Amino acid sequence: MSSDTCRQALERVYEYLDGELPPADAALIKQHFERCQACYPVLKYCKSFQEAIERASSCQCCAPDDLKLKIQELLRES
């Protein structure tokens, strides 16, 4: 894969994981991650990171609900 293609895919990895890309763009990025041995581990890491943050935020009973919502909003925006 070319470094430009990798750069473009990695710049949009969170948009891809969050389902925020148009279907055609998502398909291209999915195809890239499936074929690129250099980028695939980054995709897996980002997905694992998001899942860990989601688990951590849902298990924190000591944080006020409004704080949890604000953090979830901020994570979605990034």
Image: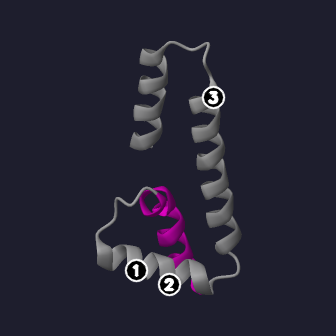
The residue under label 2 is 31
For the magenta stretch, what is the residue range? 1-17
Q: Secondary structure at mark 3?
A: helix
Nearer to the camera, 23 or 54: 54
Give the amino acid type for the residue marked by disc 3 in the picture.
Cys
Nearer to the camera, 72 or 61: 61
Pointer 3 local density, CA inside 10 Å: few below 14, some 14–19, many at least 20: few
Give the amino acid type for the residue marked by disc 1 in the picture.
Ala
The residue under label 1 is 27
User: In the rendered view, would you say 57 is above or below 52?
Assistant: above
Question: Image point 49% across, 77% down: which residue?
Answer: 30
Q: Quadrant of residue 33?
A: bottom right
Q: Secondary structure at mark 2?
A: helix
Q: Position of residue 73 (x, y in %)?
A: 40, 33
The residue under label 3 is 59
Check if mark 1's residue and mark 2's residue have beta carbons within 8 Å. Answer: yes
Question: Image point 57% across, 40% down: which residue?
Answer: 54
User: In the rendered view, would you say 24 is above or below 78?
Assistant: below
Q: Position of residue 47 (x, y in %)?
A: 61, 57
Q: Earlier in the sequence, mark 3 or mark 2?
A: 2
Cα separation between marks 1 and 2: 6 Å
Question: Image point 61% across, 87% down: which residue?
Answer: 35
Cα separation between marks 3 and 2: 34 Å
Res. 16 mark:
none
On the rendered structure, is 55 left or right of 22?
right
